[in-house]
Image (spheres, helix red, strand yellow):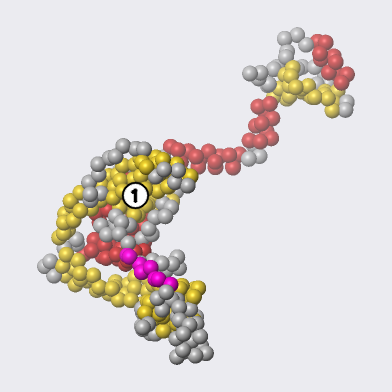
Amino acid sequence: MKLFKYHNVCDKTNFNQVINNLKNIKIYHIQNDNDEVSFYSNQKIDFDGVLSTNLLYMLYKKVIIPNIIFIFGIIVMFSIIYTTPNYIRSIQYEKDSIKDNVVWEYVENQVINNKNIDNLNELSKELSIKFSHYAFIEVYKRGSVIYINIEMEDTVNKPNLNDTIKGDFISKYDAYIEQIIIERGTVVTSLNTTVKKGDLLVSGNLIYNTNPQDKSQYVCPKGVIIGRVIDQKVYKIKKETQFLTYNGSFKKRKKYYLFNKSLNNTVYVDENSLIIENNIFNIKNILKITNEITYFKEKTAFTYDINTVKDYTESLIYYELEKNRVCEYEKIHQIKLLNIKETHEYFEVFYLVEKSVNLVYFKEIQ
């Protein structure tokens, strides 16, 4: 590759003289702009009327010096990222992960405060045992970011209402109404009001406002009503317990399907393990590629103390919200620990929880 070391500028007359006197000097990229000629050379040209400038010097003077502070900052930043294995820029949830503030704070304390990132697989195993109500908790590092992935194995069988069933929505809680998102039915409450448990929220009677006694135009309501609730939670937890829990080990592989028939060899998996498949590529189920992850279980003994039972039960509050979630607007606002009672075999933990949840409960009419 030709290496240019100098940039030269002169007028046409001087350029013609330079050409006639050059011996071992090579010139390239000659450009003519009116009466001025510019070109590059592999050596400096000492000739009257020719301005010959070293390209490295030009770079140093026009680019590096004016931006020296910025360049130094970039060098320092990348040096920290690539030369310091313990550098953590942030902690994030993996896409589609369950969100649990207790798990987040535990990970933050371990990897930020205690710099415990040497074996994140062990931390994943510890979390899966400590918070055994989740199917699996994985913590891993990519670049300078720590990712948390929380999987939930079981879900509540939410009622799939038949549109032909007539009924109303009543409130499951004493609550303050924050949002009303109703697609079908007659709303009989309003925003920024309080309701009692059992109050009518949405009537399936489409003419309720004009003739509530006429049931000829009854439908099945559809939608959600979000209300702020203050709920008391009590958990009774056995101090010493044994259970099957995910041990932090998992196996990933890609699976290929042709006309919904797997092309991969069948792999034996223990019935207590969990297999999760996520679509990567799919052409109308003719050709499909999935990412399969198998999480493995083992029998584990665990003894709760007053600190671990507090973390466990507080995490259960987030778990129950996610397990019953029907709307993105549902969330926990505040968790207040009221009391912990201890016996020889059990802990009993009392909380006051402020949360926004879906209030509606379907009540069929005859």
Q: Residue at 54%, 42% (x, y): give it.
A: 73
Q: Residue at 49%, 75% (x, y): give it.
A: 184
Q: Residue at 25%, 41% (x, y): give it.
A: 268
Figure quadrant of the N terminus: top right
Q: Residue at 37%, 76% (x, y): give it.
A: 361
Quadrant of residue 51 in the image? top right
Residue 90, position in %: x, y?
43, 51
Q: Which residue is mark 1?
A: 276
Residue 63, position in %: x, y?
66, 36
Q: Does the magenta-highlighted stretch encompass residue 269?
A: no
Label 1 residue SS: strand
Q: What are the residue bounds of the magenta stretch? A: 156-163
| Of the pair 342 and 272, the residue shown nearer to us | 272
Above or below, comparing residue 61 to residue 169 in the picture: above
Q: Which amino acid, mark 1?
A: Ile
Question: Across the whole image, how many numbered discs are drawn on residues?
Answer: 1
| Of the pair 142 and 209, the residue shown nearer to us | 209
Prevalent SS, magenta region:
loop
Above or below, comparing residue 254 to residue 28 in the picture: below
User: Can you name the residue that lies furthest to the top here?
Assistant: 23
